[in-house]
Image (cartoon, rainbow, N blue to C red):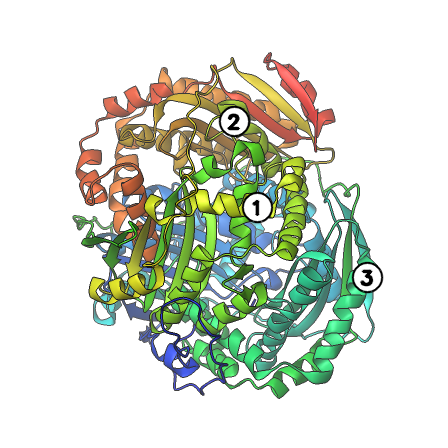
Amino acid sequence: MIRKFLVALAATTMLVQPVLAQSGAVPATQPASFAALVSQVQVPYEQFALPNGLRVIVHTDRKAPIVAVSVWYHIGSKDEPRGKTGFAHLFEHLMFYGSENNDGVFFKKLEDVGATDANGTTWFDRTNYFENVPTQALDLALYLESDRMGWLLGAVTQAKLDAQRGVVQNEKREGDNAPFGLTGYATLKALFPEGHPYHHDSIGSMADLNGASLADVQSWFRANYGPNNAVLVLAGDIDAKSARPLVEKYFGPINRGPEVKRLDAPVPRWTTERREILYDKVPTPRVSLHWPVPGRLDRAAVLTDVALTVLAGGSSSRLYNELVRTKKLAVSVSGGVQAFEKVSMAEIEVTLAPGVKPEAVEAAVKQVLADFTAKGPTADEVGRVATRNVAGTIRGLEAVGGFGGKAVALAEGAVYAGNPEQYRTELAWYANATPADVQAAARAWLTTNAYVQTVLPGERPAAEEVPPPPKVAASTPPAKGPARIAEPAVGQPPLLQWPAIERFTLANGLKVELARRTTVPLVRMLLSVEGGRAADERGSLGIQSMALNLMDEGAAGRSGTDIAELRERLGAGIGASPGMDRTRISLDALKSNLGSSLALFADIVQRSDYPPAEIERVRGQMLTALQQEASNPVGIAQRILSPALYGPDHPYGAPSSGLGTADSLKAITRDGLVAWHKRWIRPDRGTLFVVGDITAAELKPQLDAAFGNWRADAATPAGTITAAAAPPPQAARIILVDRPNSPQSLILAGAMLPITGMQDLIAERAAIDVLGGLSTSRITTDIREEKNWAYGAYAGLTDGKGQLTSLVYAPVQTDRTADSMKAIIGDIAAIKAAKPITAEERNRSIANSVLALPGEFERGTAFLSAMERNQILGRPDDYYVTSARRLGALTTADLNRAVQLFDTDKLLWIVVGDRAKVEPQLKALGLPLEVRSAP
């Protein structure tokens, strides 16, 4: 879908249909007009430019003492010269491994000051680097970002290039190893002709990555990373008056770079349909139609996105209703426009139901598309798309930075359109779209020139592999830049501010906890009832997931389509999912539409109909999802690990996906689903957590009206959790699951620990952060940074209030599977004895946990989860506020005592990979080895 960042605008009011009659007690209200919704979003900013061309945009948001620092360079993979595919992304990696005045891992100093959402990404049109830092660390963040903009090359060595080349190639293997992981390459080659800038993927080819030289690094930096090709956005606890002298101080001395040469990238106009059949290890076929369409600065991209959203964008779409609900030809449908600067990609994607012929689905898609282009959408369909987008934007703009939020909104407009307010233009295109406009766009861009891709179950081709490049002798790096000012000190951190929690209980026993936050006009609710994984009753595994999936497929006499359409008109989000110990049903509502959204939510919670026809359809979708899980390396490993560690009768011993088994899913009846709902979804066993722009005085009457008459079924006992002890831990062993032609091995390991989530495990969690949680942890440093055998390798603890396990996760290159396991075993042994946790590591772990707290609780959803967690674990409201003091009191000795908990003698290793290449390695480890075939 096109990314939309919507800001206050005198928008044209969209035609919105009246809300369906409500069966709940909350009075029905008209949804807020589109113009009214848009007027609730404000992203004011100021901008200035330095003499060297750096554009700076500042947005002030004082809700938390953090500042988003986001640097966008207007250079991406489409700008790579022939034979250098993947280079923009490889260079992005190098930017994190030292500059002349900060020659170390970039993340290290960020972790020291509690930065959150720190990362970098490369895409076709841009490369960006971002972090949210506590306000007192803003000087440091600007110093570090400016150092890699102006003082990089003297710190880039052949060894660093070789290391990051290996990491990137393993990142590519990880993506290629996923189901459908090879299809994106084929799509780009089909949509864009040879030599077109968008013809290749940003990850590049293995051969081209091998060919990247240190001279390439130097020329790419000099040509493209000048301040005049960058935009710096500061959003959060800062204002332009304060920001300007800081930016001038740190970025001002950097010289202007050359003007970047832009490649021509026209939109291809194919005159014939092109077709391709691919094969992959997937359970059912997938059919997709793709079209090249204009770039994001052209109104046609938005109009085409509206068309495809109406056709395939969600459970209310025409194709979902036709293919999934009515004809049962498919289990999922999606569609939309992925917008880029010069061109965009439009697609419809359909995953088939088992046994269905791809030809039948393709014909049905084309028939619905032909009808759409002939008759066009309705005004209601176009209006629902607009409302969905503005509601999604209101949610997204709660954050100041990271992968989304206000910094991204402003930066994208500045980079692509030279205007931070480009979102206003996009909003106007959505607001003013008429059915005739959308129909015309569909006729112009979605007709006979499709690329039709069919993926069939079968043996996937081998992923691209090449020998490692020959070793290159180290060369003398370029002369370092001029000396610069000293690295700034970081001031004292502010304390985390926790909202007051108001509590009341409805007459039916439903407990309510409210935290008021007025940062965005949203009200979020989480109905948390006892259950979680234990509610997936062992006699009918999968029943919880099936029941939750069906709750919005028919309630209070409305059909699933009615519910989906009403939810879109209201801009509401409603979902359900199980946790370890609780079953959750959530509402995310616009404040202006809360009454009707709450009425719909109450109907779904209390009056789910479980229509027989929908039960059979959802059963089919879950059976297909079960097959898809068995084709995914991570899904395969997760399905084995929990039951093996806890035992099948333990509350945590069911497969974590909640999908049950094929036999159990087939045996579930409507009577069983209704009975399950009565046992587990009940007011006397739940709490409704609320965070948002509402007072208790406003909230309580609405909840009384919506939920006051809800009563637990007197004839049905509440569901109970049967306690069961985990089996005694076994000695370390390996289960190898054979997945031929896998370009990587997926390693997942765990062991039972003698601790529970009810304990205050701050020392244990701080210790495991040092071992495998932080980006500078021992395991990550060893497997990724030093050996370059993986894109990522981690260790951690599971969650829950019962007995916990350790976890190790590492997708590694195939020829280093056993070596990686030996290295991880060695890392754990070393941290327990020969190389204990150091004072520096202790300080980093503690500082990261304490100083990151304001950033971690920037979003209302984080407060919602924390409130629930506090209740589950019996914690006081101020737990997170006081945790700073308790963490600070931990000593290095405390962490070294805690890390003794983690052992390798009882680890169960799950390895999913190519048996022919992996089994000989694993046998050499000397551990008991069981081999299984992939499901």
Numbered mark located on residue 749 in the image: 2
Query: In the image, 33: left or right of 631?
Result: left
Q: Residue at x 61, y 28 (%)?
A: 911
Q: Which residue is the extreme one toward the front?
A: 715
Image height check: is 618 above or below 540?
Answer: below
**Tag in front: 2 or 3:** 3
- The answer, for residue 253, to whether it is visible in the render is no
Pointer 1 with pointer 3, Cβ within 8 A: no
Residue designated by label 3: 360
Residue 43 horizontal side relative to residue 185, left or right: left
Confirm or deny contact between disc 2 and disc 3 (CB under 8 A): no
* Residue 87 as seen in the image, left or right of residue 853: right
Check disc 1: other Cα within 10 Å, few if <14, some if 14-19, many if 20+: few
| Residue 617 x, y percent position in the rendering | 66, 54
SS type, badge 3: helix
Amino acid type of the residue tagged 3 in the rendering:
Ala
Residue at left offset 25%, top offset 40%:
847
Pointer 1 residue: 671
Query: For the residues marked 1 and 3, what is the alpha-carbon distance in whole angstroms?
Result: 34 Å
For mark 1, give the secondary structure.
helix
